[in-house]
Amino acid sequence: MPRYAGACHCGAVRFEVEADPAEMTTCDCSLCVKRNALMIKVPQAALRLLAGGDQLATYVWNTGVARHHFCARCGIYTFHRKRAAPDAFGVNVFCLEGFDPAALPVRRTDGAGMSLQENVQ
């Protein structure tokens, strides 16, 4: 199974992904649209944080299930715990060394259509 080294822009957050994804995804929720991410879905056990846990900031909103992680130093989105699949991560393919985004198809996901919950922070 392929193994990819991953990092934010400044290198403070480093991680490793062992996965052989069949596709990449985009999402049309308000957050993903603004960050313009292209992601692969990996099981929780396939992502290993190597360094920078103290530099990893987390953004949580609405239901609180999805947890979006980014480097507090350079601001790059690295990966997130998925709301629709809490046992998996969405990983920013542009943080992965040697990953060829042109080699996989892209599937659009409907994040905007997911229910929003009122009065949830």
Image (spheres, grey):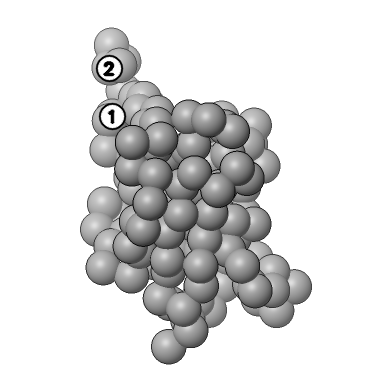
In the rendered image, residue 64, in percent from the top left (x then y), is placed at 27, 30
The single residue placed furthest to the right in the displayed view is 102
- Please provide percent x and percent y for residue 104: 65, 76
Secondary-structure class at tag 1: loop
Q: Quadrant of the C terminus?
A: top left
Query: What residue would you read off at disc 2?
Result: 120
Residue 44 in view of the camera: yes
Mark 1 touches mark 2? (CB < 8 Å):
yes
Residue 76 to residue 101: above or below: above
Tell me how many marks there are: 2
22 to the left or right of 101: left
Tell me: residue 28, above or below residue 97.
above
Q: Which mark is residue 2?
A: none
Q: Residues within 10 Å of mark 1 (few under 14, many from 20)?
A: some
In the image, what residue type sits under mark 2?
A: Val
For residue 109, say whether it is visible. no
Q: Residue at x 46, y 54 (%)?
A: 14
Closer to the N terminus: mark 1 or mark 2? 1
Within the image, what quadrant is residue 48 found in?
A: bottom left
SS assignment at label 2:
loop
Residue 106 percent location from the top left of the image? 65, 65
Give whichever of 98, 37 is nearer the camera: 98
Q: CA distance from mark 1 to mark 2?
A: 6 Å
Tell me: 119 left or right of 100: left
Vertical relation: 74 (above or below) 18: above
Which corner quadrant holds the N terminus?
bottom left
Which label number is shown at residue 63? 1
The residue sitting at 34% across, 56% down in the picture is: 49
Q: Nearer the viewer, residue 39 or 58?
A: 58
